[in-house]
Image (cartoon, rainbow, N blue to C red):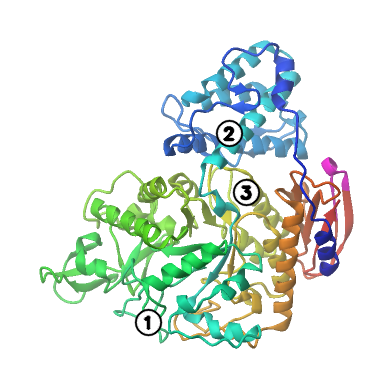
Amino acid sequence: MLRRVLSVLLALIVAVPPAGAASAISQLRSLAGSAPVGLVYDGAKPRYGALASSASLREAKDLLAYGTPSLDGGEIWPFHFKFKDGGEQIAQGAGLEGFVYAEREIARTKGTDQVIHHVQDYVRYLDTLLASVSWAEDAREYIRRLDDSISDPRQKYDALMAFVRDYTEQLQKSVKKADRAAWVRSARIYEFFPRAYNLEGKRASRGSWDALSEKDFFRDFRDQDLLDIQKRGFNTLWVMGIFPIGQRGQGGSAGGSPYSISDHEGIHKDLGSPESFRDFVARAHRLGLRVVIDFVPNHTSMDSKMLNEHPDFFVHRRAGQGEPPKGYFEHTDPGTGLKLWVRHGGYDSYGERAYWEDTTQVDYSNPALRRHMVGVVSRWVERYGVDGFRVDMAYQVTNAYFNRNWGGEMGGVPPRREFLEELITEVKARYPGTAFLAEGYDRFDDLSKAGFDLIYSKNNIGRAGGHTGWYDAMTSRDPGWIRESIRRQSFLDWQSGGMSQVTFIGNHDEPAPARALGPWMAGSTFLTLMMKGALLFYGSQEIGFDAAVPNEHKSIPFSVPVSVDWKNADPEITRFHNETFRYATAAHAALGETETIPLPLDGWPRWTGYLLKAKSPRSGGLRGLAVLANPNDHSVDYAFEYPELGVRRSGTLDAFGYTAIPID
């Protein structure tokens, strides 16, 4: 089935004609009478003021995503839609995008009759939302005049929503145009671990016997090696584990954890030199690839350059008598000879503090540390041209977590400003195209407001409007849970004000997909690779590589030496990935820009999937593609319809089966 659909898709890739659509504003004006003076629209173009400045861009994102501060200083919450026949739905965000998306979803699945009684609530909510934004006063006035001029509830509802939808769409376009880091929202990220990558073995596996000529990983990584990744549909490289690793407290026999970093600004001597890494980034850029590296803000190694030079940057106290308490180690300040007890790097684990006992905990109550860390990140962009940063354990550095973890032990009064917001704001002011990806399992809204572009889509996060994680849903095999994760992905991919998320079915922290997912591996991978938006894929899982050891479930453990065995690849897993990479690339090219619609639209599902709906269908080409999968160990019947495309389909999916259905 997959090969047949692939040939159909390749045949449908044709030129895209210009798109044209009537503005909702013309409908609004016909209902509301003559247009009031000072409309926010001049024709169909918004007058928002200059979004080119970082301040106006941030204000526009707040209006779209998070909600603005109310005039009385209170917080605006996501809109609660209460249905006429009972039940409710909470918007996924407090701003315009959450409101518009939820209303559209309700109109599609339940009909506007269920919420038309809310029309005056809409007016009040929108007035409050726009009140604190100076350049939105014309839109606010327009809504007031609309409210005064139309008495019929149905006409008022239709006119109001036509205006708000169009206003939101135009503001989204302005934000996307101004946001130079928006590239990462559609990044297809290939993560690889240089220490274990076995570049020579990978070359041999593809029939190339070109041996490594240098003992320099980055210089040996040549154009053909980059192209080999790119041809599988990836446009971004995350080079994981490039920093020098501390010696003190080092565990295992492989050279230590790549997240116990002795120098946040150095290159590991076994991988190359600063010059060879700079050349590697430049070669990737010439081929159209971007490069992301780690930033580890929470801790360093126990013998780091920063600890020796600035012990005041760490959570510590003067050494006492005897052995250090649990969670501390003894360190002698080279500058003063003073003995200190310094905290190991720590984190909250289900309400209890846990430690990485080969690391040292930094102290964000120290303004000088903050300035130092901003400088570290800025210099990686300035010196090497890296395009972005995957921020390790980012949520543990939010004020909510950091103050709870280290309250009473910090060396000063913690600033009210979020360090991560300080970091991202300053780096993007200098290098606006720099992207930030959060390893985050909590505090979604704090991270989004801090300016992150992406977050891991792993687990559910408690917040108003909900957040359902992709990875945990996939491993659950629960069709209802998976549908909710698709619904969340659909919204985050559509909106442009807040951060989106990156989906994955494996990374350096997780078990090999075949181990974690069993026979559901192919179906869940197919759903993931076909999804639009940002994707993370861990190098070596395309051949089914798994070197897990009893005490470390990662597919490439940190504790023992590992070299990816490209020669003895699992043939079935390799075939599946190669086929799916080609298919996903062809599908996205044939469809162009798409909207993701969860399937089935309503009711309790026994199967799962989504519809990729082309926003501007090509003449004679695809209007959409339905991607379906069955996470059950028995066959299920599927049926769905989508009236907007005149689509109705039904059939049967085998146990753990998957398929794609072109809609032309």
Question: Which of pointers 1 and 2 indicates the residue nearer the eye?
Answer: 2
In the depicted structure, whether residue 339 falls above or below residue 85: below
Q: Residues within 10 Å of mark 3 (few under 14, many from 20)?
A: many
Q: Amino acid at mark 3?
A: Asp
Numbered range of the magenta stretch: 639-647
Instruction: Identify the residue position indicated by label 3 in the image.
Output: 493
Which label sits in the foreground, 3 or 2? 2
Q: Give residue 660's position: percent from left, percent from top.
A: 80, 60
Q: Is residue 405 above or below residue 422?
A: below
Type of the residue with mark 1? Gly
Question: At which x and y percent is residue 5?
Answer: 84, 63
> Marks 3 and 2, Cα distance to the nearest angstrom?
16 Å
Mark sitting earlier along the chain (1/2): 2
Closer to us: 527 or 139: 139
The amino acid pointed to by label 2 is: Leu
Location of residue 100 by image quarter: top right
Can residue 205 be seen from the camera position used here? yes
Circle 3 — which element? helix
Whole-number angstrom distance, CA of label 1 to CA of label 2: 51 Å
Where is 462 relative to 322, above or below? Answer: above
Dot 2 falls on a residue whose secondary structure is: helix
Residue tagged 2:
171
Q: Is residue 627 above or below residue 107?
A: below
Give the secondary structure at mark 1.
loop
Q: Is 319 included in the stretch rendered in magenta?
A: no
Residue 251 numbered mark, or none = 1
Crowding at label 2, few (<14), some or many (≥20) Cα neighbours within 10 Å? many
Image spot of residue 271 (x, y percent): 42, 78
Can residue 645 be found in the magenta stretch? yes
